[in-house]
Image (tube, rainbow, N blue to C red):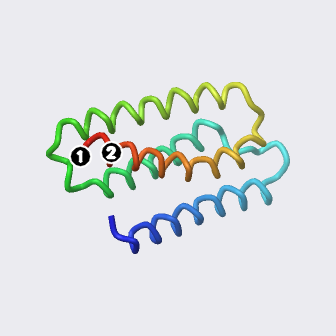
Amino acid sequence: MKFRDWIIYLGVSLLVVAFVLGYAEHAPPGSDLPRGVWLALITLVMCGYVARAFRRRWQNVKFWAIYVSLFLSHILVWLHLLSRYESHFLFPATLFMGVEFILICLLIEKIAS
């Protein structure tokens, strides 16, 4: 993956975080972003970026097995976490998604190569 691609991914990720923070800051009281909507948006962004980043490996069955298992794990873990914490947890969770994205890319790069 090129350095330029990482910069683009970082920029889009920061825009998503800025949107979530802006929504949280300016939304009327009691109108939290639904947790399911938040999880769906973040998961779609992460799945899309990871799939695009590893496009050259789409023919590799091992890649798809790892890709699907990591994102099923992602969804199960985040559903569990979101069911246990209040809505103010979304801010640190959004920041952690960037770290999770990097870890997923590193795992796929290491295992699927």
Q: Mark 1 is on which residue type?
A: Ser
Q: Mark 2 is on which residue type?
A: Lys
Q: Nearer the viewer, residue 11 or 113?
A: 113
Q: Residue drawn 31% across and 57% down?
A: 52
Give the secondary structure at mark 2: helix
Q: Mark 2 sits on what residue?
A: 110
Label 2 – label 1 distance at C-alpha = 6 Å
User: Where residue 77 sits: x, y (%)?
Assistant: 55, 28
Give the secondary structure at mark 1: loop
- Marks 2/1 in contact by CB < 8 Å: the verdict is yes
The answer to whether residue 1 is above or below residue 90 is below
Q: Residues within 10 Å of mark 1 (few under 14, many from 20)?
A: few
Q: Is residue 39 left or right of residue 32?
A: left
The answer to whether residue 104 is above or below residue 55 is above
Tell which residue pokes out farthest to the left in this image: 59
Tell which residue pokes out farthest to the bottom in this image: 4
| Label total for image | 2
Q: Residue drawn 42% across and 36% down?
A: 71
User: Where residue 2 sits: x, y (%)?
Assistant: 34, 69
Q: Residue drawn 66% across and 55% down?
A: 20
Q: Which mark is residue 113?
A: 1
Q: Quadrant of the N terminus?
A: bottom left
Q: Nearer the viewer, residue 40 or 11?
A: 11
State which quadrant residue 49 falls in. bottom left
User: Where residue 51 sits: x, y (%)?
Assistant: 32, 51
Q: Residue drawn 28% across and 54% down?
A: 54
Q: Is residue 78 left or right of residue 9?
A: right
